[in-house]
Image: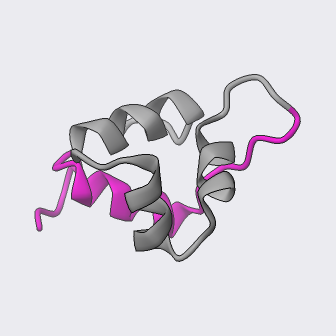
Amino acid sequence: MKPDNTPENVKKLRLKAGLTQKECSHIYGVGLRTWQKKEEVNTQNSQSLSLVEFEFLLLLAGEHPEYVL
């Protein structure tokens, strides 16, 4: 079963992939602060990953239910 696209899971998956927030911001082509907003919990400034971004993070973390890199 695929995890939900929540800030908590985004952080968990990033850590499982062995990546820092700065590395993820470079991989995804966004600023560091933009990436940090994707991991913020319970704030009005939080931003969700798009479906494609989340699927890619699942692949990087080895958690995608159907595909493996």
Q: Is residue 52 magenta?
A: yes
**Quadrant in the picture for the C terminus:** bottom left
Residue occupying image coordinates x 48% and y 36%? 4
Residue 60 drawn above or below residue 26: above
Residue occupying image coordinates x 53% and y 76%? 29
Residue 18 on image: x %, y %: 22, 45
Residue 37 drawn above or below residue 42: below
Residue 52 on image: x %, y %: 48, 69
Question: How would you classify the magenta stretch by its main secondary structure?
Answer: loop
Residue occupying image coordinates x 23% and y 38%? 16
Q: Which sits in the foreground, 16 or 5?
A: 16
Residue occupying image coordinates x 30% and y 49%? 19
Outermost left residue: 68
Residue 48 on image: x %, y %: 66, 49
Part of the protein shown in magenta: 44-69
Q: Is residue 1 visible?
A: no
Q: Is residue 29 visible?
A: yes
Residue 9 drawn above or below residue 35: above
Outermost top residue: 42
Q: Is residue 48 magenta?
A: yes
In which quadrant of the rendered view does residue 34 lie?
bottom right
Rendering colour mode: one colour
Residue 6 on image: x %, y %: 56, 35
